[in-house]
Amino acid sequence: MISNLFWIVPIAALTALLFAWIFYRSMKAQEEGTDKMKEIAAYVREGAMAYLKRQYSVVTKVFLILVVLLLILAYFGIQNPFVPVAFLTGGFFSGLCGFLGMKTATFASNRTAWAASKSLNQGLKVALRSGAVMGLVVVGFGLLDIALWFLILNGLVFTPENMAEGWKFAGLTFVHPGTTDHEKLIEITAVMLTFGMGASTQALFARVGGGIFTKAADVGADLVGKVEAGIPEDDPRNPATIADNVGDNVGDVAGMGADLYESYAGSILATAALGAALPGITGEMQVKSVIAPMLVSAIGIFLSIAGVYLVRTKESATPKALLRALLLGTGGSSALILVVLAVMAAADWITWGVFGAAVSGLLAGVIIGQSTEYYTSDGNKPTQGIAKQAQQGPATVIIEGMAVGMLSTWIPVITIVAGIIAAYGFAGGFSNFAMGVYGIGFAAVGMLSTLGITLATDAFGPIADNAGGNAEMSELPKEVRERTDALDGLGNTTAATGKGFAIGSAALTALALMSAYMEEVRLWLGRLIDKAPEGFKQIGDTLFYNSNIPQVHDGQVAVNITSATIRDFANAYDLSLFNPILLGGVFIGAMMAFLFSSMSMKAVGRAAGSMVEEVRRQFREIPGIMDGKGKPEYAKCVAISTAGAQKEMLVPSLMAIAVPVLVGVLFGVPGVIGLLAGGMSAGFVLASMLNNAGGAWDNAKKYIERGNYGGKKSEPHKASVVGDTVGDPFKDTSGPALNILIKLMSMVSVVLAGLTVAFSIFG
């Protein structure tokens, strides 16, 4: 039976979508500015939509192939029949969020610029509420998808009749006969987990493809325009400037939206699945454990909406004051969610231990975000130190930026370790492992509970960046560009902070998914036992059985699959570092983080090389560009970025799906556990380093552009542009994509656990 409180979940989701529509209509009602501003915005919108259409065309083909493969696995009984459908819905909603967010952003840029011509506060208001459309669309569709799946599976599929007699359709078993109420929720949450794989797959294509597009354009515009031609950023004479502005939308808005959709949904689903599988709880308490993460996220939506209305600033605001204005919205929402969690604990919806775990997650997110802000903001010593090194040239800028990025990892690493241990301990993990892992999952939910406002402050950045470009190309007064630059600089910091939240939640979610993976192993082992003529399945020296206790010999133990603990599975599969198969998986997982980053960076380099050549060609062959008399061929640069992104995104994205499958088939459960552990640890540290180094380089450049160390067109400025160019694929391509990678590998492993259990060769 579903608690009446569950209905808050779909209501909150619909409320988020309603306010997203309200904010969108409010943005559309703002003045568009001059005819020139409208024209430039139309160029960017046209290019962004053309790119997204081509990307979705490629991704659709990949999805269809994967769906066919999943259908084949379902037909042979080694995959749940719901998986292909769930996979499609996850990918669809993830892509839809990216599309709606980007559509909003491309309409908002010129309106933000025009609002900034009146006041800084008006510019901030338009940009933030336009960004809020992205945030609210993500949490709205994410939670709505979860609620619909739960309602359909609980009310229409797992009915008392189907649970008693089983339900088959087209030769496929959707509900096994004799399913108990306890098993029902485990099956439902296991099915729901699978749409996270679709969301992760779509997100990876969006992040990698969008990242390649935007950075190819950015590198071409900066190296040839700023460094070689000596013209300002977003100068209309630069052939790559429209492609650069298009890239801000396809990478930092559409890609980011798809990315955080799967982070948000994945954390809720993983925690719900762990709640369903908690040993020793049945009935109402099991239902509460499943619904609780959904309920927290639902209330977080209402608080996020309130947080958006709290953000405002004064015309004379400094970068620090602007940041405080945004933190009032995000911090206020986070503080209020603690009150909500305390009420839930008092009402016995969660334990006080789980409350402590959620607080641990929130605090970890805040600390990681603040450390990111410290190392990337140009108001602090690390970024200013990079700017200072620019006086010696680009080499020292690159060395200092790399050093800052590496140094910046210590706080996130220590924080996430402390957060994991605290969440595990508070929830009771030292006496009950399952509750401890549930606490870790809840920590991820707590960290992302107010994603609506957090993502709004993230999406606000590229909107402000595009507004600055529009102001420059439309030749608005100097003070307008100064205001948009202030908003853009703030956006770089909030974007870096958002990436800190994303990678922090990815680590916690990946841990929860590892435990969910073991529950899937339990599920599929149980089904193999049902089919085994001897009535048991031997793994190592452990004989797993369902009902009839098998005879054991020396050194063997018999364990009921239903009551088996993680330690039982660990002993059976030898899940220790002394197992060379598991250790091999660890190394492969760590390698994946570096290999994936290398491939995505090289992809940016190749696409950027083509862009540089094209910009140089146009400067050389089109007469009158530098005099403002000749018109650059913007469309050709957009086409180069589009073609480069479409070509280069396939291999790294498909590799992230293929490797977990291959490792599972070859090395079995120990290999997969090693793969996920290695990928999670190496990916987390590497992503933190890449995100922070890239953000610091970018803001060091902006620090110089505000008049420090010679200002624009000086030699230090040229050196900082080189550093920023190096950092672009760090922070906008490889870094953000890594948090998707570690979760996608986990999701693929969970979804295909049946294949691993049934057919592994060496594991």
Image (cartoon, grey):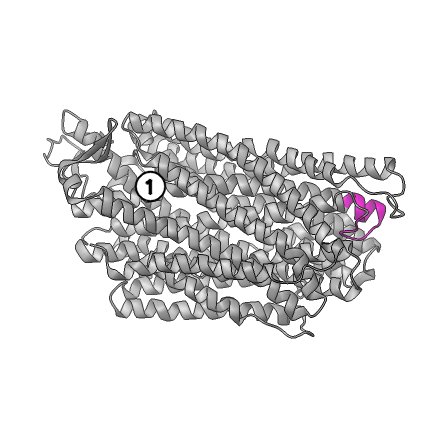
Task: Name which quarter of the figure residue 315 lies in.
Answer: bottom right
Does residue 502 belong to the magenta stretch? no
Quadrant of the rendering where the C terminus is positioned: top left
Instruction: Please rate how many residues cluster around mark 1, counting C-alpha atoms within 10 Å: few if below 14, some from 14 to 19, many from 20.
Output: many
Picture coordinates of residue 715, whole percent (x, y): 83, 53
Picture coordinates of residue 451, whole percent (x, y): 47, 58
Identify the magenta region.
223-236
On screen, 586 above or below 283? above
Q: What residue type is labelled 1?
A: Tyr
Picture coordinates of residue 60, whole percent (x, y): 49, 33
Q: In this view, does 210 lie to the left or right of 225?
A: left
Task: Name which quarter of the figure residue 544 lies in.
Answer: top left
The answer to whether residue 685 is seen in the rendering is no
- For image coordinates 74% across by 64% down, the residue present is 480
- Counting the numbered discs, the total is 1
Quadrant of the rendering where the N terminus is positioned: bottom left
Picture coordinates of residue 389, whole percent (x, y): 75, 56
- Residue with the mark numbered 1: 517
On screen, 519 above or below 482? above
Q: What element carries label 1?
A: helix
Q: Residue 402 versus residue 373: which sits nearer the camera?
A: 373
- For image coordinates 47% across by 53% down, the residue present is 138
The answer to whether residue 461 is seen in the rendering is yes
